[in-house]
Image (tube, helix red, strand yellow):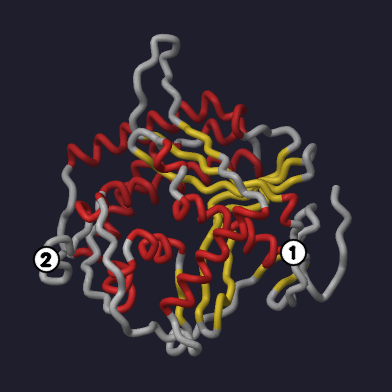
Amino acid sequence: MAKYIKSNTDFNGLPKPNRVKSKNKLPLWKFIPKDIDFSYQKVISFSQYQTYEQCNYKWYKQSVEKVIPFIPNMNLVFGTAIHHVFQHYLKTGYEISFTAADKEDIFGLLQTKLTEEYQTQYKKYGKHFSNPEEMAEFYDDGVAILEWFKKKRKIYFSSKGSQLVGIEMPLQKEISKNVIYQGYIDLVMYDEDLDKVKIYDIKTSTKGWNNYDKKNEYKIAQVLLYKQFFSELYCYPIDKIDVEFLILKRKAEPNEFTDYPKRIQEFKPANGKIKLKQSQERFNSFVKNCFDNNGKPIVKEHTKNISKLCEWCPINNTNLCIK
């Protein structure tokens, strides 16, 4: 176990406001997010940054001018629901036992969460955006993922030598004056044998990530920023943090060697000092290019990035975006 060092600064020499010592066995500080005054403070999320990297112009229209309508879909509903069930199963497993977790009606919980999330998005949007057939297909896909995971759980999460550090662990950091990054880590585990923390980000995908996805710098930047911010905010040595994506696949190709095709894809991106520095610099560049010294969005003409992603953009070939 790493030696815990009492100090008024974290491992990066930063002050430790809003933190209390955690009851967890780890030498970890508990981070308590501050209240945000939205009258003058601007909150940014990773999804905003990802949108900016995809298309500067879309980010400005969506996050500043707010003229791009929000259109929900079943991928969003499914992602929220399966995250909740996946996390509930692991929380039960580590806080009670995996015998108890296996007895949980996670399929019933999935159905409930799909319905609840659909109703939430329906009320926001004001009209239906799916149908019973599509919802049934997403439910069946979720059941297939959960069934496979229950059978293979020990490959990913052992009950021996592992601790559940937290679920939806908060991150909140002032990037520049009045510009605050806020996010939540899906899952954080501690490996007692390796004396390391592992940060997991859970993604849902139709068929998994291909090489294009794995080389997508602004996609993998999420866990790199999580690693940096977690180290700073929870005062844990950055060289003792690993990161990993768990991609839950809705569709899996049949395999003649098994009745249960693999439904979870693991991806561990390079996360050494160079990669961390590059992701931090790109993120800081986003903030510098988009916000002034008081945290207000800079009014200017942002670049349109013409790509295959335009096909799915709600303002593509409208009066808001004529290319």
Assign the C terminus to one quadrant of the image. Answer: bottom left
Please indicate whether residue 170 sits to the left or right of residue 124 in the image.
Answer: right
Per the image, label 1 sits on a secondary structure element best described as loop
Q: Which mark is residue 235?
A: 1
Query: Measured from the top left, where is residue 187 in percent x and y?
Result: 58, 49
Q: Which mark is residue 318?
A: 2
Whichever of callouts 1 and 2 sits on the residue coming sooner in the sequence is 1
Q: Residue at the location (29% across, 60% down)? A: 120
Query: Please, what is the three-letter code of the amino acid marked with disc 1?
Result: Cys
39 relative to 304, above or below: below
Residue depth check, mark 1 versus mark 2: number of the one nearer the observer:
2
The alpha-carbon separation of the residues under discs 1 and 2 comes to: 48 Å
Q: Which mark is residue 317?
A: none
205 relative to 261, above or below: below
Per the image, label 2 sits on a secondary structure element best described as loop
156 relative to 23, above or below: above
Please indicate whether residue 8 sits to the left or right of residue 37 in the image.
Answer: right
Residue closest to the eye, 268 or 187 = 268
Please indicate whether residue 256 sits to the left or right of residue 187 in the image.
Answer: left
Query: Measured from the top left, where is residue 216 in percent x and y?
Result: 44, 48
Q: Residue at the location (85% across, 51% down)? A: 2
Picture quadrant of residue 131: top left
